[in-house]
Image: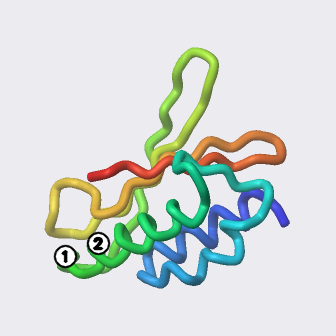
Amino acid sequence: MSNRFIINKLISTCTLGKPYYFLPYLFLNVIQTNMPNKIRFYYFFVDIIRQAHKSKKSALKLVKEPIVYEGGNETNYSFYDSFHRGPRISIIIREEQNKIYLTTLPF
């Protein structure tokens, strides 16, 4: 299973508001999170998805924003609706050869 396939599942999970779609992929060895363990990440992720879909005014659309810094390369996956200025969901993803690092932002 490729990194791209897993990230596409994450994207569809966020746009559809179905966090359980991503659950089988979360526990793959290629996924690392910023939380102490993957169960905690999942509970926080579920809460983010629920709150985003509760407060959205229209369908969520993905905007990818590259983050380039010395020694690294990440992409901020932000999901916006047509009403709010700020993203409803924001996840920073760093891809390496056989790893995907997921960082959730609290707001």
| Depicted 76 relative to depicted 50: above or below | above
Quarter-of-image position of residue 24: bottom right
Residue 63 - label: none
Q: Classify residue 55 as left or right of residue 22.
A: left
Residue positioned 43% across, 74% down in the render: 46
Residue at the limit of the structure toward the top, as seen here: 70
- What residue would you read off at disc 1? 55
Q: Position of residue 85 (x, y in %)?
A: 16, 55
Quarter-of-image position of residue 26: bottom right
Q: Classify residue 29 as left or right of residue 22.
A: right
Residue type indicated by callout 1: Ser
- What residue would you read off at disc 2? 52
| Depicted 87 relative to depicted 103: above or below | below
Residue type indicated by callout 2: Ala
Residue positioned 57% across, 15% down in the render: 70
Q: Are marks 2 and 1 in contact (CB under 8 Å)?
A: yes
Quarter-of-image position of residue 71: top right
Marks 2/1: CA–CA distance:
5 Å
Q: Nearer the viewer, residue 1 or 80?
A: 1
Q: Position of residue 90 (x, y in %)?
A: 38, 54
Q: How is the image coloured?
A: rainbow
- In what quadrant of the picture does the N terminus appear? bottom right
> How crowded is the residue under tag 2: few (<14 C-alpha within 10 Å), some, or many (20+)?
many
Q: Secondary structure at mark 2?
A: helix
Q: Position of residue 16 (x, y in %)?
A: 45, 83
Residue positioned 56% across, 37% down in the render: 74
Residue positioned 36% across, 71% down in the render: 47
> How crowded is the residue under tag 1: few (<14 C-alpha within 10 Å), some, or many (20+)?
few
Q: Nearer the viewer, residue 72 or 44?
A: 44
